[in-house]
Amino acid sequence: MIICSIEAIDGAGKTTVFERLKEDRDINDGSLHIEYARFPTDDFYQMYKRLNKPSGDVFLNLHNEDKRSLVKSARSREVDLLICDRGDVTQTVYNGQCSKDTMYSDLVLFLKTRVETAMKRIAHRGSEDIYGFETEDKLKHIANRYLRVLNRLDYRGRYVEVVTDNKTPTEVYKEVKGYVISFLSRKYAIIGKE
């Protein structure tokens, strides 16, 4: 099974890209068993709320168990490609680490967005609660952590960067779709449509 994750700060367009991939008939043409999942899952957030802001170690264990469960479930259904709205990069950014037995993404699509752009997009959404990470200072800190994590040796060659500033959602999606189809063509010898 191949794991692809879409990674970025809040407001970069992850969910928009994720939803468009789910609906794209060129990618979901039936030649592969593809599933889509949000990570962390709803189960993780319910447990997180019940524990009332757990310690870092407990938080990391929750993330790890959530990812293991997600991957195990997908494997049991013989999924070829699991596309995640966030994955191991986000887990490392927010926790400072990933456990050694975490399933790493084979392809990481990083939507690079300036914090100012992300803040405008978040403000446009309304009063959505994203667990307190929507302040400009926090997003700057998190954006810097994404860049540090992705520049580590273990991610080199596994991620592509898509700059979203000054692009329409359609332009961003077209670029992401091209990377996904190219990756699948190499892995499964599938010729996709651009």
Image (cartoon, helix red, strand yellow):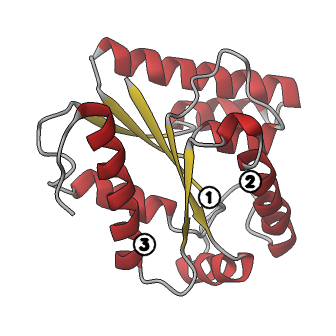
As displayed, is residue 164 above or below residue 168?
Answer: above
Q: Which mark is residue 8?
A: 1
Q: Residues within 10 Å of mark 3 (few under 14, many from 20)?
A: some
As displayed, is residue 46 above or below residue 169?
Answer: above
The residue lying furthest to the left in this view is 30
Foreground pick, 79 / 129: 79
**Tag 3's secondary structure?**
helix
Q: Amino acid at mark 1?
A: Ala
Q: CA distance from mark 2 to mark 1?
A: 8 Å
15 with respect to 63 (left or right): left
Foreground pick, 54 / 95: 95
**Tag 2's secondary structure?**
helix
Q: Quadrant of residue 82?
A: top left
Q: Amino acid at mark 3?
A: Val
Q: Marks 3 and 2: in contact by CB < 8 Å?
A: no
Residue at the spot 22% in from the left edge and 49% down from the top edge:
27
Q: Which mark is residue 95?
A: none
Q: Amino acid at mark 2?
A: Tyr
Mark 2 lies on residue: 146
Mark 3 lies on residue: 172
4 with respect to 153 (left or right): left
Q: CA distance from mark 2 to mark 3?
A: 19 Å
Q: Quadrant of residue 112?
A: bottom right
As displayed, is residue 119 above or below residue 70?
Answer: below
Q: CA distance from mark 1 to mark 3?
A: 13 Å
How many dots with numbers?
Answer: 3
